[in-house]
């Protein structure tokens, strides 16, 4: 016979998620999920999707292999600046491209 374990309340799950990952939904002024969700688990909660970040411009996927020191640095930098790694890489490549274009026009 399998053992049943209690999951806990939505408030407890939110608190645990906030402790582990930071603010749930990116907005601390919103009501808790339990306050918005008074129905059963299959009930849809209006307004939850509006916490998603605005869509980014279309991007193409590209796998890049990084040296271990750069991999560690970019993960920490992106976390510390609250950015996606892709955004950090895109900005660095834009700056590198601009520098290369400047060098090429001077030759």
Image: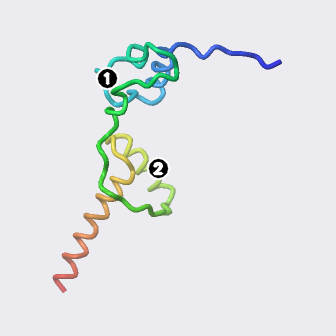
Image coordinates for residue 37, horizontal then vertical, percent: 42, 17
Total labels: the figure holds 2
Image coordinates for residue 58, horizontal then vertical, percent: 33, 58
Q: Residue at x 64, y 13 (%)?
A: 6
Tell which of 35 and 62 is nearer to you: 35
The quadrant of the image that shows the C terminus is bottom left
Classify mark 1: residues with Cα within 10 Å, few (<14), some (14-19) or many (20+).
Answer: few
The quadrant of the image that shows the N terminus is top right
Classify mark 2: residues with Cα within 10 Å, few (<14), some (14-19) or many (20+).
Answer: few
Mark 2 and mark 1 lie on one chain; the one further toward the N terminus is 1
Residue 37 vertical placement versus 78 (above, below): above
The residue identified by callout 2 is 72
Residue 62 vertical placement versus 75 (above, below): below
Mark 1 secondary-structure assignment: loop
The residue identified by callout 1 is 28
Residue 60 vertical placement versus 86 (above, below): below
Mark 2 secondary-structure assignment: helix
């Amino acid at each position: 016979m399998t053992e049943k374990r209690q999951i806990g309340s939505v408030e407890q799950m939110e608190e645990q998620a906030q402790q582990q990952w930071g603010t749930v939904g990116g907005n601390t002024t919103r009501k808790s999920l339990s306050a918005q969700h008074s129905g059963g688990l299959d009930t849809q909660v209006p307004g939850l999707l509006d916490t998603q970040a605005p869509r980014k411009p279309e991007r193409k996927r590209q796998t890049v292999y990084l040296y271990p020191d750069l991999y560690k640095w970019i993960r920490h930098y992106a976390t510390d600046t609250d950015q996606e790694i892709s955004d950090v890489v895109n900005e660095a490549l834009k700056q590198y491209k601009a520098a290369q274009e400047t060098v090429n026009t001077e030759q």
